Image (cartoon, rainbow, N blue to C red):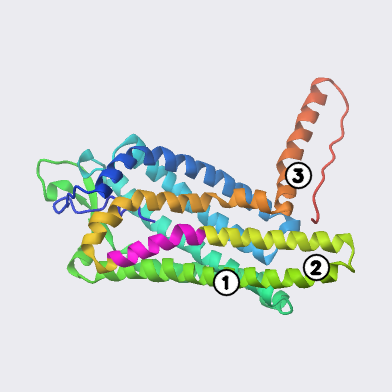
């Protein structure tokens, strides 16, 4: 996440560059708070719905367990960013001279760290999801053994621990300082590189390289390779399946079709990650090599990169509804059917009628 990259320059060392990136950044920042807040609100609600649906008893599977962890990471990402966007872009301005309080500036720093950590957890959970689906599609003979529920839980735990370790350099990157330290005429607080980062010239470039290459580019490369393998395997399997289904019943054909829809849904989730994350990794890697590029390009595109991350975190509910029949049926049963039943019960009570509530549940699609 780039929330500090677009606003964390030293008050005494700001570099004003009159180029198209600066102009674009200043114009877009007027709308960023409203756009990102709407996406965050939708994303938090939709991912909570994802968690509710995916944790139903008949929906529990290794794949859905990872999707649930992914949804939880996205909820945490967008929850803290929603508060950040409302404060810094709607109710105040992302300017050091605004007179921000010390507490709010510490919140901005904590927001940055939480968002970076949770979103990168989501990145590697998506890689894990692709690995599990690759095994299911390409090595189905050993899939049940290699991709069990226990192994899915272990995978989630490993992702959480490794992600926190990879993000440690970011935890020591920034500090909150009082503007009066540099400009006695100004009041309030702002964010700058930590004293440790300032005293070690290689600290920031190395952190950018870890963030850009290991946390962004490496997962995207792995996801691209795995997606290509899955698509090729599905194409070959489809040819064989068509021959076999000529002798099979209708139920087998429908089960196979649902399996393919589920796989394509997961591939869509993976590819959307690659599209939104890979450019950020490239820009972060270049910023680690060229400080001028960071100041003139990367920092001015911070809000747009934030927006891409938020879209990525919010889109999964739509993909599930479009591409998974089982998800749609479970969602409909949980919310639409129950809402209609409750409305009928309420109507019956008002009319003084006896009523019986019947609860239905989708057991398998």
Queried whether the magenta region covers residue 274, the answer comes back as yes
Identify the residue at image location x=80%, y=29%.
Answer: 344
100 horizontally vs 115: left or right: left
Give the residue displayed 88% in from the left and 60% down from the top.
250
Marks 3 and 2 close (CB-CB < 8 Å): no
Give the number of the mark in front: 1 or 2. Answer: 2
In terms of depth relative to the viewer, which is nearer, 69 or 307?
307
Closer to the camera, 257 or 10?
257
Label 3 packing within 10 angstroms: few (<14), some (14-19), many (20+)? some
Q: Which residue is mark 2?
A: 242
Res. 92 image quadrant: top left
Please state, as top left, top right, bottom left or bottom right, where the N terminus lies in the image: bottom left
The span shown in magenta is: 273-287
> Residue 215 location, x and y as percent?
42, 67
Asked whether residue 194 appears in the rendered view, the answer is: no
Point out the residue furthest to the left here: 184
- Marks 1 and 2 close (CB-CB < 8 Å): no
Is residue 260 located in the magenta-colored stretch of the structure? no
Neighbourhood count class around disc 1 (C-alpha, 10 Å): few under 14, some 14–19, many 20 upward: many
Mark 3 or 1, which is nearer the eye?
1
The residue to which callout 1 is attached is 226
* Cα separation between marks 3 and 1: 34 Å
What residue did someone put label 3 on?
A: 333
State the CA–CA distance, disc 3 to disc 2.
32 Å
Left or right: where 144 falls relative to 172: right
First in sequence, mark 3 or 2: give its number: 2
């Amino acid at each position: 996440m780039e929330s500090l990259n677009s606003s964390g320059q030293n008050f005494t060392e700001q570099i004003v560059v009159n180029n198209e990136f600066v102009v674009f950044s200043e114009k877009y920042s007027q709308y960023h708070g409203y756009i990102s807040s709407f996406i965050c609100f939708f994303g938090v609600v939709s991912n909570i719905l994802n968690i509710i649906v995916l944790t139903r008893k008949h929906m529990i599977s290794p794949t859905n367990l990872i999707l649930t962890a992914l949804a939880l990471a996205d909820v945490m990402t967008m929850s803290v960013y929603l508060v950040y966007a409302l404060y810094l872009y709607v109710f105040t301005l992302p300017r050091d001279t605004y007179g921000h309080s010390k507490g709010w500036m510490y919140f901005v720093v904590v927001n940055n760290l939480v968002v970076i950590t949770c979103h990168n957890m989501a990145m590697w959970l998506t890689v894990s999801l692709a690995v599990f689906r690759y095994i299911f599609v390409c090595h189905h003979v050993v899939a049940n053994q290699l991709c069990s529920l226990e192994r899915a839980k272990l995978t989630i735990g490993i992702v959480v621990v490794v992600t926190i370790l990879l993000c440690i350099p970011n935890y020591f990157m920034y500090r909150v300082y009082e503007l009066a330290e540099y400009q006695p005429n100004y009041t309030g607080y702002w964010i700058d590189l930590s004293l440790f980062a300032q005293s070690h010239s290689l600290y920031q470039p190395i952190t950018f390289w870890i963030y850009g290459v290991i946390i962004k580019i490496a997962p995207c490369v792995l996801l691209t390779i795995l997606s290509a393998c899955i698509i090729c395997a599905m194409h070959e399997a489809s040819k064989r399946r068509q021959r076999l289904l000529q002798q099979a019943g209708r139920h087998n054909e429908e089960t196979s079709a649902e399996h393919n829809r589920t796989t394509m849904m997961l591939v869509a989730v993976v590819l959307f990650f690659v599209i939104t994350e890979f450019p950020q990794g490239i820009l972060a890697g270049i910023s680690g090599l060229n400080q001028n590029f960071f100041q003139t390009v990367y920092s001015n595109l911070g809000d747009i990169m934030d927006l891409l991350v938020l879209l990525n975190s919010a889109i999964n509910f739509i993909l599930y509804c479009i591409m998974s029949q089982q998800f749609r049926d479970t969602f409909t049963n949980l919310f639409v059917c129950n809402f209609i039943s409750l409305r009928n019960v309420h109507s019956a009570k008002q009319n003084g009628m006896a009523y019986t509530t019947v609860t239905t549940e989708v057991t398998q699609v």
